[in-house]
Image (spheres, rainbow, N blue to C red):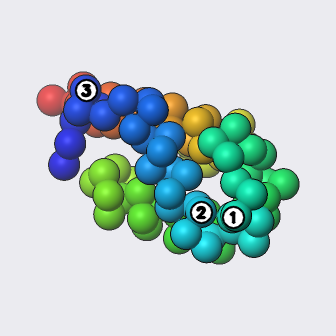
Amino acid sequence: MKRASDWTIVQLTTMMHEILAQGLLPMAEQLTVEANLFDAGLDSMAVAQLLLEIEARTGIWLEEALLTPDNLSTCKALARCVHGAMASEDARP
């Protein structure tokens, strides 16, 4: 598993966009990193698949408390959330 310091927000944002643009969202072809994910069709099934893919790629499982509308609003917001979760994981003894 990579540490938070191994990832930049830009890299994570790009990864979130790639995951979501691969068909998880009905409007994937119009998705940008700043687009509102809920407007693009993000639903509970897509969130579940997204979380599995994030864990597969980063080794980080996002706790349910982090799955707020703000954290799931855009690819960039989600990337910041994942980076924060990585940093928290890194800080654990």
Residue where numbered disc 3 is placed: 5
* Three-letter residue code for mark 1: Ala
Instruction: Give the residue drawn at x 74%, y 57%.
Output: 30
Residue 47 appears in the rendering: yes
Q: Amino acid at mark 2?
A: Ala
- The disc, 3 or 1, on the residue closer to the chain's N-terminal end is 3
Residue drawn at x 43%, y 67% is 52
Is residue 63 something one can see in this rendering?
A: no
Q: CA distance from mark 3 to mark 1?
A: 29 Å
Q: CA distance from mark 3 to mark 2?
A: 25 Å
Instruction: Name the residue carrying label 1.
Output: 28
**Do the residues under discs 3 and 2 have CB atoms within 8 angstroms?**
no
Percent across and percent down for residue 31 are 70, 54
Please give left or right for residue 43 compared with residue 66 in the image: right
Tell me the kind of residue under disc 3.
Ser
Q: Report helix, strand or loop for mark 2.
A: helix
Question: Do residues under tags 2 and 1 come within 8 Å of each other at their CB atoms?
Answer: yes
Q: Residue 88 falls in which quadrant of the image?
A: top left
Check disc 1: other Cα within 10 Å, few if <14, some if 14-19, many if 20+: some
Q: Residue furthest front?
A: 29
Mark found first going from the N terminus, 3 or 2: 3
User: Dot 2: within a 10 Å radius of its alpha carbon, few (fewer than 14), some, or many (20 or more) residues?
Assistant: some
Residue at figure coordinates x 48%, y 45% from the top left: 14
Q: At which x and y percent is residue 11?
A: 40, 38
Residue matched to label 2: 21
Q: Nearer the viewer, mark 3 or mark 1?
A: 1
Q: Marks 3 and 2: which is nearer the front?
A: 2
Where is residue 19 shown, x and y percent of the image?
Answer: 50, 61
Give the SS element for disc 3: helix
